[in-house]
Image (spheres, coloured by chain):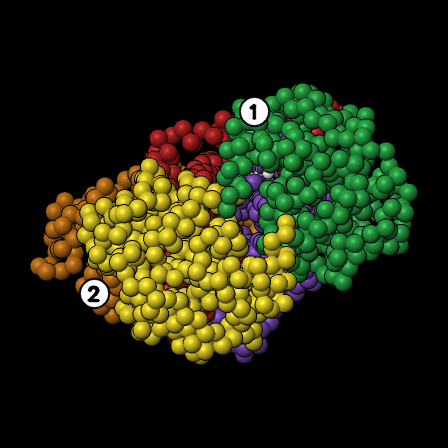
Chain colours: A purple, B orange, C green, D yellow, E red
Amino acid sequence: MYLSELTSRLADGFLVTLQLLGWSMLIATVLGTALAAMRVSPIPPLRALGVSYVNVFRNTPLVVLFLITVVGLPELNLLTGSFFWRAVTALSMYTAAFVCEVVRSGINTVQVGQAEAARSVGLTFTQTLRHVVLPQAFRNVIPPLASVYIALTKNTSVASAFGILDLTYQLSDLIEDFPGSLYWNFISIAACYILIVAVISGAAALFERRVGVSR
Amino acid sequence: ACGGDDSEGANVEVEENPEFPEGSTMAEFAEAGQIEIGVKFDQPGVGFMAPGADVPTGFDIEMGKIVAGALGIAPEDITWTETVSDNREPFLQQGTVDIVIASYSITEERRQVVGQTGPYYVTGQQILVREEDKETITGPEDLAQAKTCSVTGSTSLSNVVDDYGAEPVPFDTYSDCVTQLQNGSVDAVTTDGAILLGYAAQAPDELEVVGETFSEERYGIGYQKGDTEFCEFLNETIQASYEDGSWAEAFESTLGESGVETPEQPELDSCQ
Amino acid sequence: MAASNQSAAAPTGMNVAVGEPLVRMHGVNKYFGSLHVLQDIDLTVDRGEVVVVIGPSGSGKSTLCRTINRLETVDSGTIELDGQPLPAEGKGLARLRADVGMVFQAFNLFAHKTVLDNVTLGPIKAKGEKKADAERHAMELLERVGVSNQVNKYPPQLSGGQQQRVAIARALAMRPKVMLFDEPTSALDPEMIKEVLDVMTALAEEGMTMVVVTHEMGFARRAAHRVVFMDEGQIVEEATPEAFFTDAQSTRAQDFLSKILTH
Amino acid sequence: MAASNQSAAAPTGMNVAVGEPLVRMHGVNKYFGSLHVLQDIDLTVDRGEVVVVIGPSGSGKSTLCRTINRLETVDSGTIELDGQPLPAEGKGLARLRADVGMVFQAFNLFAHKTVLDNVTLGPIKAKGEKKADAERHAMELLERVGVSNQVNKYPPQLSGGQQQRVAIARALAMRPKVMLFDEPTSALDPEMIKEVLDVMTALAEEGMTMVVVTHEMGFARRAAHRVVFMDEGQIVEEATPEAFFTDAQSTRAQDFLSKILTH
Amino acid sequence: MNSVMFDIPGPAARRRQLIGTIIGTLVVAAILGWVLWTLWSEEQITPDQWEPFGEPDIISALFEGLLATLRAAAVAIVLAVVFGAILASGRLSEHAWLRWPSIAIIEFFRAVPLLLLISFIFLGFGSTLGTFYSLVLGLMLYNGSVLAEIFRAGILAVPRGQTEAGYAIGLRKSQVMRQILAPQAVASMLPAIISQCVVALKDTALGFVIGASGIVNTGESIYISPLYNNPLAVGFVLAAVFIVINYSLSKLATWIEARQRREGRSVVHVNDTTTGPAAGGIH
Ligand SMILES: Nc1ncnc2c1ncn2[C@@H]1O[C@H](COP(=O)(O)OP(=O)(O)OP(=O)(O)O)[C@@H](O)[C@H]1O
Ligand SMILES: Nc1ncnc2c1ncn2[C@@H]1O[C@H](COP(=O)(O)OP(=O)(O)OP(=O)(O)O)[C@@H](O)[C@H]1O
Ligand SMILES: [Mg+2]
Ligand SMILES: [Mg+2]
């Protein structure tokens, strides 16, 4: 009885967590990369915007961001309908700051000599970027990006306090019907998160090995 | 700053030099001239600490003052301590607080570990909706597919989800639920009527408690288990407040603000 | 090593006019902040000439080298290549740089590309050569520098000497008018120095115009037409290797030589 | 440079018996995984002798050097210092290491300590010398290597040549019986090589027992009593510098010398 | 000066950059304008939304909440340093029976969401621990595990040559640890430890879920009171407070890091050091 209920609720929660994770990952990656492009651009106001964004969102607790999007956005008549998208907004905006930093440092850890060598053989700006800088930056970015996604996975749990029925929500919800199930709830929910974390780091390792043959 | 127009609430009578049997709990309190009461801080109308205020307000608070008054303790000599749902029993057991008046439903399980007497108020699960929806949502039957907010892990939520097919939206506090109701993100909030009334009282034009209660919650006062003498005193005090009108006054100045009628005075359990 | 002489575009080889100025720097000044790293530099390198630049650390040798293909800009003065002033940017600059081969101290091979791709990237992308042509030419050059059996490896899998020789092949693949070498052997183990210097010496003998920053006095003696001694951003002395090593005029040069030659 | 001769414990100086074996390696083998880096090494270094070890990169020179003070363990064979086998661990090993001075390619000065503290740390902590005594001795040594005006600086504030000379002083402060140098000049700019080699030459002339891995053939010619040539983990040839440089017996040594001497 | 992305600009590039700067400024201004307009038109920048933050009672309540937050973070970090040091020495131990449990503990607490952990602790032991220590315990377990990795990395980041030089002058293992490794490791880890304080401080906000007092809790009590009903204003104020504190801490960390770089010392980064599946530092 408990077991079947546990599995079915974990499955529900797992699905919600995965959805949160998937959408936030996608949006944060796109937004974060755009911000990183701003941060390395030679245009001062865009650089300033990128820097401010990172400093603001990296230093704000995620809970406060959730508070602003979940309670505050409807006040502006934005996203009134959906808790899910408000949660995704908070998670994406927060995570984008970290993606931005990771991508930026991925670009910056490509040695200047590589770009100079590319310029020296007569490649233009776009060619240098496309054939030399970005492929190497991409490779530098994979491991830290995986770390960001793992942090994001864990951060999705904050949504459970803001109207979302994700994995973490099931912890207290199950106790209601099965008092005394706390330890099993915790262990099995933790196992679900560890599973996601393991998949992400496994995928990153695989990916890194494929693009990183030369090391 | 909410509910009553002044933070003192209704005027409570403070007994001058009450007489108590030597060595009784009441005598100790009266002697000390102070008492520590565990209350909720986050339920407007019931037990609520406004930001920046130093004393809470609400029906539970008024009941606390009545009890203290009977012990000869003035309201300003009461120490209000916040209790949350999970720590009421341990706080009583460890003596962190002297009594608990915190929307504390009387149940058999709780009576195994602490003393509970009353009820001084009987309520039940009800539904809070926006004023404009009071025609469309009139009871739990209308909650099918409706986004319904309550506190994470509460029975109230599983009741409406399992029995009436509501779409659950769990939050940490009822206040969050009410905020979401006001900004249109959820359609209904459900929990004890008393708590809902507290919110309705704060925004009588916007919010409405609808339908009959569909469960029974009996709020009691928690005390150290086994102190029958003190239990008797609490019962006498509550009974006296029924009779001298201070109970009704306490209700009207808090939960009654929303315009609901003052309910029947519930029959008290006897102390074993 | 006859291969490269056959390619019509290559300016190397015996049949090329020697003597007219190819690189001409005039009144060049360069600052890093308040540091005056190049002070009124006048330097002309003729077609087919091999110029070795020596001087103490921090004297501005690398900076000089890098201004010639505009990896550094100058604050005043002019630099001309083959009679044309350096373009400031864009396609023109890219084309100029294709005419100037550069070999770095740290090799700077593209870490994510194989040896062959390193050599063909420039010809294919910057010159629009066909892949097959570029690869054929690259194989010739790799053979010439002696690493043709390593073409499918990645740079970190090679020894330093091999990497530097690939870097030379990569620069030569653009059929440059002039080659710049910035301490090409100072990151190498001693046994590998020779294999790189041998390639460079052969190149010099074929008539390639070269500017070489190096501490290898043997190479300077053997291959240079002219030695330029720099100190504190200035060209202090210019002479034939012969004259310079036996009879340096300035005390700064004498002092430097005494440190570097006696061990 | 008379200072060190006065210190009674110092085994250097003219009044010390020259000729008896101080370091003796016998049948030493060492593997890294499946790589056989030291193969049946037999090597004896006499008191007062200066032995220069040369050989191609990866031939096992550093490993040989490091086994002598047991920074690397050996898989078979014996190593004796002054007639005693190397202790395997604990106090005994620490005491042994105090008798063997080591100078590394990368200097390895303690980055968080001043020059003076670098030199006195060993004497104070490992030998229990009094701080004042240790500092007096340290100042003598720092003067001797020519950096006595830098004693309160931190290592990163010094030039490479200065750092290496401090490292030599640090090793000498333990009054070692033998000094090991593992490519002490190969991380240095050319102008700084001489200042370090000069210190080493002086040390050799005073009679210090030294094992020196180096590519500086000038130093080997000038200061070595014996040259040991290693290749692929083996000692291929041993000879006086004279004999070795003019008339190497093995083709491997000839080959190596031809690479390293001609540029 | 030279960046990996861009060549040194010539006149045309500088002109393009100038145009880009102008357009960029306009775009940024437009974004800011739109945000302000939305806030204005939805009546979020009216005096009554912000008034409460002028009331002395509310200011002092927020201040007390902040103190509670800082106290929780401080206690948690101190405990986490101790816990982390124990775990790190376990993980660096030569004994497998010490190493493997340490690794398991570290990896487990780094992979489990902190919120889940705190809720679990509170639901299971909250009645004895109370909200404050439930929060502190959760923070300690998580941050301790991350710090353990930082400590380990700090020790390993001291170049090998330093250890060898220590041995070579006759120091023993414990002396090398005390005289050479520990002082350099602590210096190199300092920035990473400060960054972890930022993480801990942010995570302290999670305490509101179990009702632990703190500035977020205070803020919530402000906006849910119908008198004010100003969630956005509260959110902005809370965010501003955290940004000011955390930004200063981060600046301190970068300043120390820059100073150490200048002195030629190595610096440990939290994220460079992740060997296991979970990453610290980014929470
Ligand atoms: N990008 C830069 N920013 C600031 N200063 C620089 C930069 N590049 C070089 N310098 C300074 O300019 C001076 C000349 O540097 P340069 O690299 O040209 O010397 P060098 O003669 O090549 O020395 P080395 O033999 O050490 O390579 C040095 O003092 C150096 O510190
Ligand atoms: N710690 C180690 N683990 C595995 N292999 C090692 C280790 N140290 C050295 N080796 C290998 O052992 C061989 C000998 O190394 P060693 O450093 O003694 O050579 P060397 O003669 O000093 O070379 P170099 O001139 O480059 O310093 C090399 O192939 C090297 O890759
Ligand atoms: Mg240079
Ligand atoms: Mg070596």
Chain designation of label 1: C
Q: Residue at x 45, y 78 (%)?
A: D27
Query: Label 1 neighbourhood size at 10 Å, few (<14), some (14-19), many (20+)?
Result: some
> Which percent across, then down, holds residue A42?
66, 32
Name above or below for residue D164 compared with residue E114: above
The quadrant in which the N terminus of chain E is found is top right
Residue A22 appears in the figure: no
Instruction: Choose between E71 and E122: the one closer to the eye.
Output: E71
Residue ID for mark 2: B227
- Residue type pointed to by label 1: His
Q: Which numbered dot is residue C36?
A: 1
Chain designation of label 2: B
**Disc 1 and disc 2 on one polypeptide chain:** no
Number of numbered callouts drawn: 2
Residue farthest to the left? B22
C-alpha span from label 1 to label 2: 91 Å
Q: Which residue is drawn at 50% across and 46% down?
A: C263
Given this view, does label 1 or label 2 mark the residue nearer the observer?
A: 1
Helix, strand or loop status at disc 2 = loop
- Residue type pointed to by label 2: Asp
Q: Residue at x 51, y 37 (%)?
A: C258
> Which percent across, then down, holds residue A20?
62, 56
Q: Which numbered dot is residue A179?
A: none
Tell whether E170 sits left or right of E109: left
Q: Residue at x 74, y 61 (%)?
A: C150
Helix, strand or loop status at disc 1 = strand
Tell whether D76 sits left or right of D98: right
> Which percent across, then down, holds residue A84?
62, 52
